[in-house]
Image (spheres, rainbow, N blue to C red):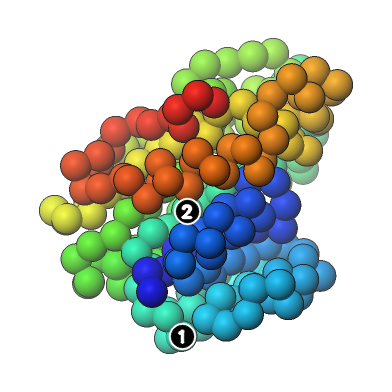
């Protein structure tokens, strides 16, 4: 069975990707901060699927998780960096240093940490796709979300540079998932978030799109169609 590693699986897009990838016959190795959510997912999706509580902002935590996943399932065929935080709506100068640091630690450092520990065995195998979730706000800006914009613009640059470093046969892609009605969108849009597709609807389109990414897409910014 092909293996997909997904971060941020406790809710929203991550949780629905777990459901859809499992239905497609993939082995899922997922992580989230919540120990309870990891246990619930483990009860819902039995072996060979695995779920762990991981602080992706902590390199040692990611390393320990990666060692276990690779020992159990081998190098992933697909690495999906989905986990992210967003700041409470506010002008940049009103965002505390603590909140700003937390965003960069998860959204940027967390992505780099997973790549640091999962990419080498993928490179040794010579195949595999790394998808780093960006955002429409990784290619544009809006007021009151400057820290989030900064992290997602960083993901765009990080991913395109990574694409230049990977060997032939692999791909790294920055992916704008689109506008989806999740807790994160509700924090920004309020009741207007209800105008947008649900995570369930999104996953039905997004997972087949992810499965279609190949080495020919290396470095190409992508967006989930219709989202």
**2 or 1: tag closer to the N-terminus:** 1
SS category of the residue bearing label 2? strand
User: Going 77% across and 43% down the picture, which residue do you hit?
Assistant: 98
Left-right relation of 31 to 175: right
Please tell me the numbered disc located at residue 80: 2
Residue 155 percent coordinates (x, y)? 46, 38
Quarter of the image containing the N terminus?
bottom left
Residue 111 percent coordinates (x, y)? 50, 52
Q: Cβ–Cβ below 8 Å for labels 2 and 1?
A: no
Residue 29 percent coordinates (x, y)? 53, 70
Establish if 60 lies above or below 201: below
Establish if 118 lies above or below 153: below
Residue 224 percent coordinates (x, y)? 46, 32
Q: CA distance from mark 2 to mark 1?
A: 18 Å
Quarter of the image containing the C terminus?
top right
Q: Which residue is mark 1?
A: 72
Q: Residue furthest left?
A: 168
User: Going 45% across and 67% down the picture, which residue do you hit?
Assistant: 26
Res. 162 visible in picture: no
């Amino acid at each position: 069975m092909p293996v997909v590693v997904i971060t941020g699986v406790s809710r929203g897009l991550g949780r629905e990707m777990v459901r859809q990838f499992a239905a497609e016959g993939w082995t899922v190795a997922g992580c989230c901060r919540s120990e309870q959510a990891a246990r619930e997912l483990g009860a819902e999706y039995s072996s060979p699927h695995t779920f762990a509580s991981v602080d992706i902002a902590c390199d040692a935590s990611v390393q320990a998780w990666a060692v276990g996943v690779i020992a159990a399932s081998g190098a992933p065929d697909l690495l999906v960096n989905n986990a992210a935080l967003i700041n409470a709506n506010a002008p940049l100068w009103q965002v505390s240093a603590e909140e700003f640091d937390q965003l960069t630690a998860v959204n940027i450092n967390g992505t780099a940490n997973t790549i640091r520990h999962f990419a080498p065995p993928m490179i040794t195998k010579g195949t595999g796709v790394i998808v780093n979730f960006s955002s429409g706000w990784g290619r544009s800006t809006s007021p009151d979300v400057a820290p989030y914009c900064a992290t997602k613009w960083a993901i765009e640059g990080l991913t395109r540079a990574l694409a230049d470093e990977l060997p032939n046969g692999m791909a790294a892609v920055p992916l704008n998932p689109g506008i989806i009605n999740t807790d994160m969108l509700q924090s920004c849009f309020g009741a207007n978030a209800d105008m947008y597709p649900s995570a369930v609807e999104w996953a039905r389109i997004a997972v087949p799109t992810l499965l279609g990414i190949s080495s020919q897409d290396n470095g190409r910014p992508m967006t989930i169609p219709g989202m």
